[in-house]
Amino acid sequence: MSVFDDPGLFGRLWADTYDDPGNPDPAPAVDFLAGLADGGPALELAIGTGRVALPLAERGVAVEGVEASPEMVAKMRAKPGGDGVPVAIGDMADVPVAGPYRLAYLVFNTLFNLVDAERQADCFRNVARVLAPGGAFVIEAFVPDPTDFDRDEQVRMRAVTEDSATIRLHQYDRAAQTFVRQTVTFDRDGVHLRPFAMRYLWPEQIDELAERAGLRLAERYADWHRSPFGADSASHVSVYRSR
Ligand SMILES: C[S@@+](CC[C@H](N)C(=O)[O-])C[C@H]1O[C@@H](n2cnc3c(N)ncnc32)[C@H](O)[C@@H]1O
């Protein structure tokens, strides 16, 4: 298995540290999603450690999940309320659940964790299959920034302390719209590699995937606060509706 065909890799490398401080506050996403859930049920693809799902469930929404990594789900199960969220272990491109759901959502750029164009299309087709009529599919993702990959590579410092240094290296394939990233940590124990890959999409390309699956773009914002989306927006929150 390689970084391009191992959906469980992320959790094996990151589950232990995923909930360390640094990830976004889920509150604005939870407000936004609770408003669309209509009581539920709601489905989070790639539910992870429940960063968004648990506070959404606390708001009274019946939340379920799909997740490739048992390690990430184990972290959720250890949190208050984490036992009450049903999770299907599997690939989010297959959406291995029956539905129907009033709301499905895939946040924090995680659509791009599907590194193959066909699997991204499968994901939309399968979400459309499990959405209730008029149900919503919400995507949160970054807008690719061409200055990030104008030389097909990028090196960034991530953290330096007295005991360690961490850098991130990206190698882009612009034709395939993919990158491989290594997060490299040097410390007294040696060199630690945490590989990761993504296939990034521009918002219009995501709209095409949705269209092909029978979903239409209903709303698009720059963030969870419903700030207007524009040419300079670095990210988007897009709401697709089944026809
Ligand atoms: C950045 S985390 C996001 C977790 C959670 N949605 C959140 O917002 O905190 C990405 C998650 O996607 C999961 N994942 C990656 N590829 C997957 C796949 N093909 N199917 C299901 N889950 C996948 C990883 O295991 C990880 O839990």
Image: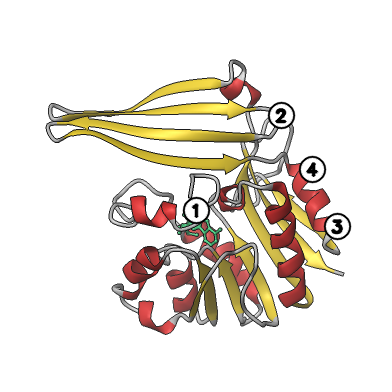
Query: Residue at 65% of width from left, 44% of height from top?
Result: 222
Which mark sits nearer the N-terminus, 1 or 3? 1
Query: Residue at 86% of width from left, 64% of height from top?
Result: 214
Residue 122, position as x, y percentages in the image: 72, 60
Circle number at residue 204: 4
Closer to the eye: label 1 or 2: 1
Q: How far apart are marks 1 and 3 (CA)?
A: 26 Å
Circle number at residue 6: 1
Which mark sits nearer the N-terminus, 2 or 4? 2
Residue 210, position as x, y percentages in the image: 79, 57
Type of the residue with mark 2: Ala
Which one is nearer the viewer's eye here, 4 or 171? 4
Q: How far apart are marks 2 and 3 (CA)?
A: 22 Å
Which mark sits nearer the N-terminus, 4 or 1? 1
Residue 183, position as x, y percentages in the image: 37, 35
Q: Are marks 2 and 4 in contact (CB under 8 Å)?
A: no
Q: Residues within 10 Å of mark 2 (few under 14, many from 20)?
A: few
Label 2 residue SS: loop
